[in-house]
Image: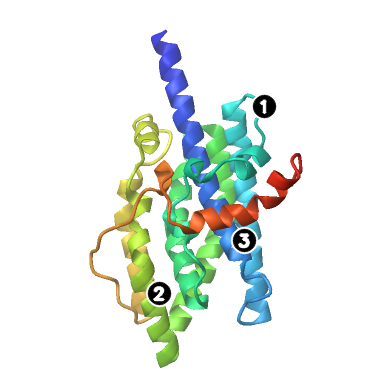
């Protein structure tokens, strides 16, 4: 009975962790796709749409794995479209509104800087399926990081207006960056089992990565501040409800639709 209980707890933790990764990509991908047709120039409009689609592709792989772990006949569509706000485990960073182009760039850069570090560790996971998803996703994430970092530099070291606006965006969104490094109960358990990295140990490398780009962009790293948290446990900002209402409308109005 003890072995069964441990296995069950581990599988539940793994499923919740995979949902956390999937939900974050889904919500951020949804946000990014809101730029379709509204980008500052056609090339970047297309780039934003492609990044959003990449995130949705990664989301599908993760939801498929989570559905397998859950069993009970669940599908990726059930997990994306038939859960309520409190059941979503995405980072609060992902659900923040797009704001202007600079705000979107900063949000993407902070996330991809973390995601690049995380996936590099996850591809070494003892869980082969998680490792395979991470390795495949890393190819796209490397591009997302490069694209967003280049735009941070371009805007920060650009005109006086672009510099002041992106610095303002950094100062406003920084409070949502710390949650990435605060491990949930599931992350703590899986890290002890060696299945995933301890996310708190990634913070120093992330800070150095971000600081290096900010310095090249002549931007200032915000001072220490209170970090918002709650997304991993289903406590969200007011923005998530509006995202889900729009995203889930078709499936809830006409049940049985598929991607």
User: Where's residue 214, x and y in %?
Assistant: 36, 74
Which label number is shown at residue 52?
A: 3
User: Where's residue 160, x and y in %?
Assistant: 40, 92
User: Where's residue 164, x and y in %?
Assistant: 38, 85
User: Where's residue 8, x and y in %?
Assistant: 46, 20
Q: Residue at x 23, y 64 (%)?
A: 224
- Residue at the limit of the structure toward the top, as seen here: 1
- Judge left or right: residue 104 versus residue 209: right
Q: Residue at x 62, y 67 (%)?
A: 34
Q: Quadrant of residue 7?
A: top left
- Name above or below for residue 200 compared with residue 220: above
Which label number is shown at residue 73?
A: 1
Residue in the foreground of this view, choosing between 182 and 92: 92
Which label number is shown at residue 12?
A: none
Q: CA distance from mark 1 to mark 3?
A: 28 Å
Q: Secondary structure at mark 2?
A: helix
Q: Secondary structure at mark 3?
A: helix
Q: CA distance from mark 3 to mark 2?
A: 20 Å
Q: Quadrant of residue 110?
A: bottom left
* Residue density around tag 2, few if under 14, some if 14–19, many if 20 or more, within 10 Å: many
Q: CA distance from mark 1 to mark 2?
A: 43 Å
Which label number is shown at residue 169?
A: 2
* Mark 1 vs 3, N-terminal side: 3
Q: Quadrant of the N terminus?
A: top left
Of badges 3 and 2, the one in the foreground is 2
* Residue density around tag 3, few if under 14, some if 14–19, many if 20 or more, within 10 Å: many
């Amino acid at each position: 009975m003890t072995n069964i209980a441990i296995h069950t707890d581990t599988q539940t933790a793994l499923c919740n962790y995979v949902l956390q990764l999937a939900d974050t990509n889904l919500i951020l991908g949804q946000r990014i796709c809101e730029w379709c047709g509204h980008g500052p120039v056609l090339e970047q409009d297309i780039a934003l749409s492609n990044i959003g689609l990449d995130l949705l592709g990664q989301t599908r792989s993760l939801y498929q794995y989570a559905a397998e772990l859950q069993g009970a006949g669940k599908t990726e569509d059930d997990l994306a479209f038939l859960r309520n706000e409190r059941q979503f485990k995405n980072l609060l960073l992902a659900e923040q509104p797009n704001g202007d182009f600079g705000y979107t760039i900063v949000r993407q850069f902070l996330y991809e800087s973390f995601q690049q570090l995380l996936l590099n560790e996850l591809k070494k996971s003892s869980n082969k399926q998680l490792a395979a998803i991470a390795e495949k996703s890393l190819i796209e994430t490397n591009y997302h990081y490069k694209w967003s970092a280049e735009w941070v530099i371009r805007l920060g070291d650009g005109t006086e207006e672009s510099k002041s606006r992106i610095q303002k965006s950094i100062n406003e969104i920084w409070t949502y960056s710390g949650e990435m490094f605060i491990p949930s109960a599931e992350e703590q358990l899986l890290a002890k089992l060696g299945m995933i990295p301890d996310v708190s140990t990634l913070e120093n490398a992330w800070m150095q990565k971000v600081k290096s780009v900010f310095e090249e962009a002549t931007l200032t790293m915000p001072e220490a501040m209170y970090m918002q948290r709650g997304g991993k446990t289903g406590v969200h900002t007011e923005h998530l409800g509006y995202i889900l209402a729009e995203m889930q409308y078709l499936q809830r109005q006409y049940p049985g639709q598929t991607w």
